[in-house]
Image (cartoon, rainbow, N blue to C red):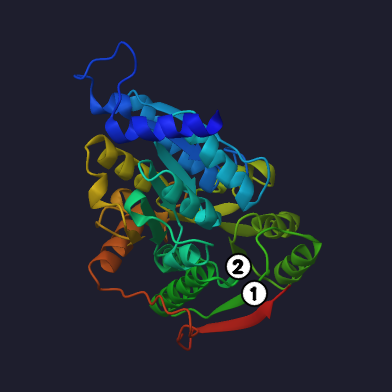
Amino acid sequence: MKKILKLFVAFSMAFGLAACGSSSDDSKEADIRVAMITDSGDITDQSFNQTTYEAGKAFCEENDLEFNYYKPASDDDSARIAMVDKAVDDGYNVILMPGYLFAEAAAYGTNTYPDVKFIALDLSEYDLQGASEEANMDALYSTVYQEEIPGYMAGYAAVKMGYTELGFLGGMAVPAVIRYGYGYVQGADAAAKELNTQINIKYVYGGQFYGDADITAKMDTWYSQGTQVVFACGGGIYTSAAEAANKVNGKLIGVDSDQAPIIDGTYAEGMTITSAMKGLANTVTTLLQAIVDGEFDSYAGKVDNLGLVSENPAENYVGLSDSTQWCDTFTEDDYKALTAKIYNGEIKVSNDTENEPTVSEFTTVDYQGSIK
């Protein structure tokens, strides 16, 4: 029966069969049903899942489209694939997939349901190449983001705000995390040169994307030695930095989405000075609008590397969070000016992950390898 249902859904999508009682004059929007699958976590994670969910839900409500989300039963490929089957069985024909963990599910989904439109966020060509089968790119649009740019902005902002003892705690040393970190070093160094101020940066990878006692101990050591702010970059690894910071009134920089609500709400008000963000919401809105407009074909088959598209921070796919703690030495206008300089090419941010950034005499970087 399940197989028959799948065939019927595929046949209906392929030939545009209308539901009973509908008219051939119904709008295209009536045929669009959007589902989001979480990587395994909740839609309240203050990260990829929540941002994708909120953006998808808001767009669908505004455009009178049906929207739902599915949470896998466990954190593995088979569970994510099962949710693809479930969503299509339920009649959804646009699937949102947030994160690099969706490589297998994207490959499976695009080959099994070629008439369904799959939108993957932060899923790279490298990730897709690691799947057990080649994805059907005609049914897939995927993005990666230029993490070095918001990393640069975060480092620049921190030094402009007056912090001179900085830390970078990465998750695993994968290209996206490295780009964040190397951008952070470049931005901090640029601000130090402008201010003629000496800064020090401690730099380490946790070797995982969650905090634990060992990583917290390392952060305790950093903060006790004078580190003022740590860029915690890698999923839930921020918990270790936040636990340590909370003991000494230290500060954090969030990643991927605006993490101030969850960090400040859990640990201490004002702990998060800014977050280096990827524009997941902008991506979701842009692609869903393209589907409504019948323009998905102009996106299908691409793995776009998204960054700045304007001098206006609100229009870009990377940047700093609205909750940034603007101050006299780093105002919102300063941020807009910085964005314009990067967009116009006046400031060039390297995305080289093979070589450590070159820094000036104003910056010392202590690379400490990996904790795990």
Hey, what amino acid is under mark 2?
Gly
Hey, what amino acid is under mark 1?
Val
Tell whether 305 sits left or right of 273. left
Separation of residues labelled 2 and 1 (CA atoms): 6 Å
Instruction: State the quadrant of the C terminus.
Output: bottom right
Identify the residue shown where x is 40% and y is 47%. Answer: 119
Instruction: Quickly name the residue at label 1.
Output: 204
- Crowding at dot 2, Cα within 10 Å, few <14 / some 14-19 / many 20+, comes out as many
- Crowding at dot 1, Cα within 10 Å, few <14 / some 14-19 / many 20+, comes out as many
Tell whether 187 sits left or right of 14. right
In this orientation, which residue lies closer to the viewer: 327 or 259? 259
Q: In this view, does 147 lie above or below 291?
A: below
Residue 125 in picture, x, y percent from top left: 42, 65
- Dot 1: element: strand
Residue 257 in picture, x, y percent from top left: 49, 50
Q: Is residue 253 above or below residue 196?
A: above
Instruction: Quickly name the residue at label 2.
Output: 170
- Dot 2: element: strand
Identify the residue shown where x is 57% and y is 82%. Answer: 365
Q: Is residue 27 visible?
A: yes
